[in-house]
Amino acid sequence: MDKFANLQAFVTVVETGSFSRAAERLGIAKSVVSRRVSLLEGRLGVQLLQRTTRSLSLTGPGQQFHARAARILADLDEAEESIVNVSAALRGSLRIAAPLSFGLHHLSPALNELMVAHPGIELDLDLNDREVNLVEEGFDMAVRIGPLRDSTLVARRVGTARFVTCASPDYLARHGVPRHPKELEGHTGMHYANVPLKQAWAFSADGQGVGNAIPDIRMRANNGDVLAAAAVAGLGIVTSPTFIVSGLIASGRLQTILDGFRRPATGIYALYPPGRLIPRRVQVCAEFLAERFGDHPYWDRELALGDLAEGPRPTERT
């Protein structure tokens, strides 16, 4: 039991980033958490954590040990869950990584409903546009949007992300409305930095690529809400997923352009680590998200923009 408690204390410190937050999550004193981690280090004969008055970080051996320790705890959790009747209430922690804007606009409200329906679930949500390593960082699930790279991760499509090109009515009144992607040349644009320029400004009509021009990029950012706000301020044209700008379009603060030319839609996916039993709470979460979002999510139905171009569907395992 001591070995398990020490392992749990170490993994919780890494996940929460501090001894104090780990103590809160485990419901024990901070001194007990510190002692358990020290006992673990003493038994292993290596330092796992580099401690200073202001920061906490993993050592090299600590990084290697954490990945295995997190897996051991997850496997134990899965073993317990595998013998519980499927009708029993869901319980346990659910650690999810997701993009910031999608998390704020749509994932967070959905997860709130899930937690109300299942009081035994504890949520640890990391909202960040970076691509996390599910295994090394101990995540149960990640939500990703866009084409998936080949890997051993298991993927389930839970929704569809569509894109529109838009600008403020004021900007269009001052600079004119482009009628074809080629007319973007000479206009000012804002670009989502995590996507290559040619991909973000690639348009098609009736499933066929068309001649494109990239506007003069005045602003780059790694967050879509920042770019949408710049477009509302009249700074230029942006291509954006509808899950970010649907409300701005409905309120008239942004106006869509080039409606006959679309950037191909892409999938919204729930990804799981490979080679292990997927906990029932993770499966239920993914099913809940698929039912809530789906191929025709509520934010698109509110816009009435007609059929938007669909991207190819990859297989469920990528």
Image (cartoon, grey):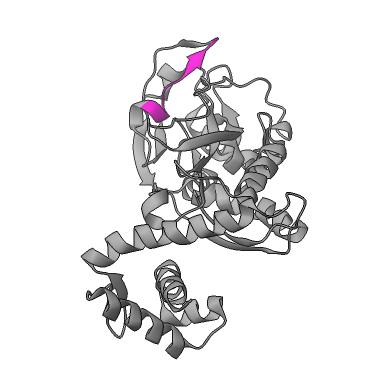
Give x and y (percent) for residue 313.
53, 22
46 shown above or below 151: below
Work out whether residue 132 can be spotted: no
In the picture, measured across the screen, residue 57 lies left or right of residue 117, that is left
Between 61 and 183, the one lying in front of the other is 61
Between 80 and 305, the one lying in front of the other is 80
> Which residue sits at x=47%, y=31%?
175
Give x and y (percent) for residue 256.
59, 30
How many marks the image carries: the answer is 0
State the image quarter where residue 195 is shown.
top left
In the picture, measured across the screen, residue 152 lies left or right of residue 75, that is left
202 shown above or below 274: above
Residue 98 forms part of the magenta stretch? no
Give x and y (percent) for residue 285.
65, 48
Q: Which residues are magenta?
A: 199-206
Q: Quadrant of the C terminus?
A: top left
Give x and y (percent) for residue 280.
64, 49
Work out whether residue 306 can be spotted: yes
Between 52 and 75, the one lying in front of the other is 75
> Which residue sits at x=73%, y=32%?
301
> Which residue sits at x=39%, y=18%?
212
> Which residue sits at x=75%, y=60%?
116
In the picture, measured across the screen, residue 284 lies left or right of residue 274, that is right
